[in-house]
Image: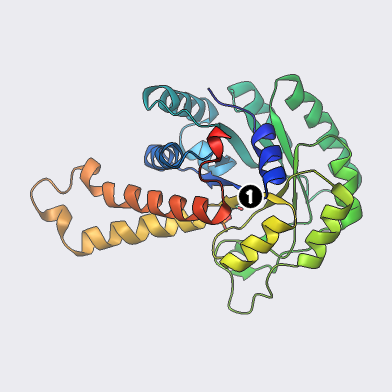
Amino acid sequence: MLVSATEMLKKAKAGHYAVGQFNINNLEWTKSILLTAKELRSPVILGVSEGAGKYMGGYHVVVGMVNGMLKDLDIDVPVALHLDHGSFEGCYKCIEAGFSSIMFDGSHYPIDENVQKTTELVKAAHGRGLSLEAEVGSIGGEEDGVVGMGECADPKECKAIADLGVDFLAAGIGNIHGKYPANWKGLSFETLDAVQQLTGDLPLVLHGGTGIPADMIKKAISLGVAKINVNTECQLSFADATRKYIEAGKDLEGKGFDPRKLLAPGAEAIKATVREKMELFGSVGKADE
Ligand code: 13P
């Protein structure tokens, strides 16, 4: 059964480790992530962006697929199904469809509007037993070739949003979605420290987990980060393994074109990436604690 992410992240913050949010795109992604979590006895959060939800056919498709896998693959570790960077309307759709957690990304609204919309969604989510993530300070990234550096959150605004009863908070600390540019200045630990001082026990979320060096990940966890989002890195490892299979001409040998064979190296590559991240984040074995 799906669970909200509240308990697993409270435990992670208290135990000084982080739970990975791995974004899913299809059945192979979902299966690889869930089987790795089960094998490593790690709690896990499946992230679904609005675009990925649409790609998979809709939120009900996603909920049906994930619930089916939990049952048929006997996944007995805590799993949350979480909307990633949800719009106000998207959050309501996922609450209705059966997600167990949502993120409302109100970071592009003026702070008063972010507060008002987050307040309403906290009520709606908690009323149905879901956890809610809010965001302050935008996460940068590449869009149409323009690379944003990632804006640092204002700790006072983080405190204002934290006080609304959100379950965990994404604060921009110079992190960026996608690959980091060569001139990236690194994470702002001063911002993270200031945010944690004002928000206390609230689990903090680090987006843009792809390509952040291990020492920065460890330091971020020591300063209160309890959830780390990874998306691009699984996409890169899947694409790389698939490219190798095809470049080696394996799809032309025997029944190598069978999708179950063609997609297998990519699915295995996702498992290896997820394993590496769970080990780095310290969540291995925590499902049973
Ligand atoms: P990356 O694609 O950089 O790993 O970021 C993932 C993320 O933060 C999803 O919200």
Colouring style? rainbow
* Residue 186 % position (x, y): 68, 71
Res 110 seen here: no
- Where residue 30 sits: x, y (%)? 43, 38
Give 279 or 192, whichever is nearer the viewer: 279
Asked if residue 25 is positioned above or below residue 146 in the image, the reply reads above
Q: Which residue is mark 1?
A: 17
The C terminus, quarter of image: top right
Element type at mark 1: loop
Q: Quadrant of ligand 1?
A: bottom right
**In the displayed structure, does residue 244 sit left or right of residue 6?**
left
Q: Is residue 115 left or right of residue 181?
A: right
Q: Amino acid at mark 1?
A: Tyr
Q: Residue at x 81, y 25 (%)?
A: 123
**113, 214: nearer the viewer:** 214
Q: Quarter-wise, where is residue 244 in the image?
A: bottom left
**Residue 282 placement, left or right of 184:** left
Residue 10 in view here: yes
